[in-house]
């Protein structure tokens, strides 16, 4: 993380690794974002899972182990685990997340399910997948990557991520993936700049994180949240814009950053895709697109890939 952070902060366009947004406070704020009226991604994702989960699970053999990458507080995992309870006596569930806070919240949300064996893996998605305990004999795994988390990857990182996920699966395993699809920027931007200011607080919390963990001295009042649409890359970008010139010391990196008025710190991107892109990336990774369900009101795809 040290070198990633140093490289980003010293680039011409200053950036930070998006993982810094998801500290203890950031994880709580992101859960709040999913509840604001403008963030239709979360509600559509949940509704699609409720509507199509039985059909998706019906395409997979039993018994299954369930892995979720970025489970949040476990609302979607609970749906899957409750459905599996009717067709197998016990289910091992692996929750993989960099946030210990999110994992503890997930465990609390699922602890009343008597047929579930909960395993928390506090790590990045890919490293966490590689650290799972050996599967039980005869069991397949279904990996959940929901909430359109794939949007955090660009068009180089996305295919690479799917390849690396596939390397950690066995033939017959599955990936249940949701991805928000292309739509008019005017519909997307409010989801990243809500009227209540929850997303702005989530974004500015990265400065709190840098001050606390890296010895920085950002003045929060000097930076405002901006959400932008990058048409060429088909993505929303979140930036923190300096309102006036500032010199910021980051003690643990022995760096002094200089911001001009209007200069930004780029904190996160959220890309938009189409189903054919996803199909092609899956095929190149060794994942066959078995089924895709698309919401028409808020275009978002729930897709089921099988490892070949």
Image (tube, helix red, strand yellow):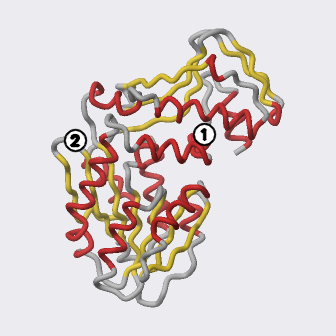
Q: Residue at x 46, y 90 (%)?
A: 137
- Whichever of callouts 1 and 2 sits on the residue coming sooner in the sequence is 1
Q: Which residue is mark 1?
A: 17
Residue 138 location (% of width, % of height): 41, 89
Quadrant where the C terminus is found in the figure: bottom left
Q: Residue at x 35, y 25 (%)?
A: 231
Q: Which residue is mark 2?
A: 298
User: Tag 2, which secondary structure?
Assistant: loop
Q: Is residue 196 left or right of residue 224?
A: left
Disc 1 vs disc 2: Cβ atoms closer than 8 Å? no
Residue 5 location (% of width, % of height): 69, 37
Residue 95 location (% of width, % of height): 51, 66
User: Tag 1, which secondary structure?
Assistant: loop
Image depth: mark 1 or mark 2 in front: 2
Q: Is 157 rendered above or below residue 113? A: above
To which quarter of the image does residue 203 belong? top right
Quadrant where the N terminus is found in the figure: top right
- The residue lying toward the viewer, choosing from 286 and 72, is 72
Q: Residue at x 38, y 74 (%)?
A: 173
Marks 1 and 2 sit apart, C-alpha to C-alpha, by: 29 Å
């Amino acid at each position: 993380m040290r070198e990633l952070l140093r490289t980003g902060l010293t680039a011409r366009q200053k950036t930070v690794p998006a993982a810094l947004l998801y500290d203890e406070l950031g994880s709580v704020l992101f859960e709040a974002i999913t509840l604001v009226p403008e963030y239709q991604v979360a509600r559509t994702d949940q509704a699609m899972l409720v509507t199509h989960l039985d059909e998706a699970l019906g395409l997979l053999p039993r018994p299954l182990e369930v892995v979720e990458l970025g489970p949040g507080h476990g609302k979607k995992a609970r749906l899957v685990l409750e459905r599996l309870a009717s067709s197998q006596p016990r289910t091992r569930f692996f929750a993989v997340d960099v946030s210990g806070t999110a994992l503890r919240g997930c465990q609390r949300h699922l602890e009343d399910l008597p047929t579930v064996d909960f395993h928390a893996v506090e790590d990045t998605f890919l490293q966490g997948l590689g650290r799972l305990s050996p599967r039980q004999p005869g069991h397949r795994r279904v990996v959940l990557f929901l909430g359109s988390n794939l949007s955090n990857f660009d068009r180089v990182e996305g295919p690479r991520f799917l390849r690396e996920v596939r390397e950690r699966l066995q033939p017959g395993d599955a990936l249940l993936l949701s991805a928000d699809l292309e739509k008019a920027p005017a519909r997307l931007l409010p989801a990243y700049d809500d009227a209540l200011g929850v997303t702005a607080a989530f974004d500015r919390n990265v400065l709190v994180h840098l001050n606390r963990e890296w010895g920085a001295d950002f003045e929060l009042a000097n930076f405002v949240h901006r959400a932008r649409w990058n048409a060429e890359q088909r993505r929303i970008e979140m930036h923190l814009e300096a309102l006036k010139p500032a010199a910021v010391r980051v003690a643990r990196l022995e760096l002094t950053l200089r911001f001009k008025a209007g200069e930004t710190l780029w904190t996160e991107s959220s890309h938009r895709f189409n189903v054919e892109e996803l199909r092609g990336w899956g095929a190149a990774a060794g994942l066959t697109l078995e089924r895709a369900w698309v919401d028409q009101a808020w275009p978002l795809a729930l897709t089921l890939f099988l490892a070949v």
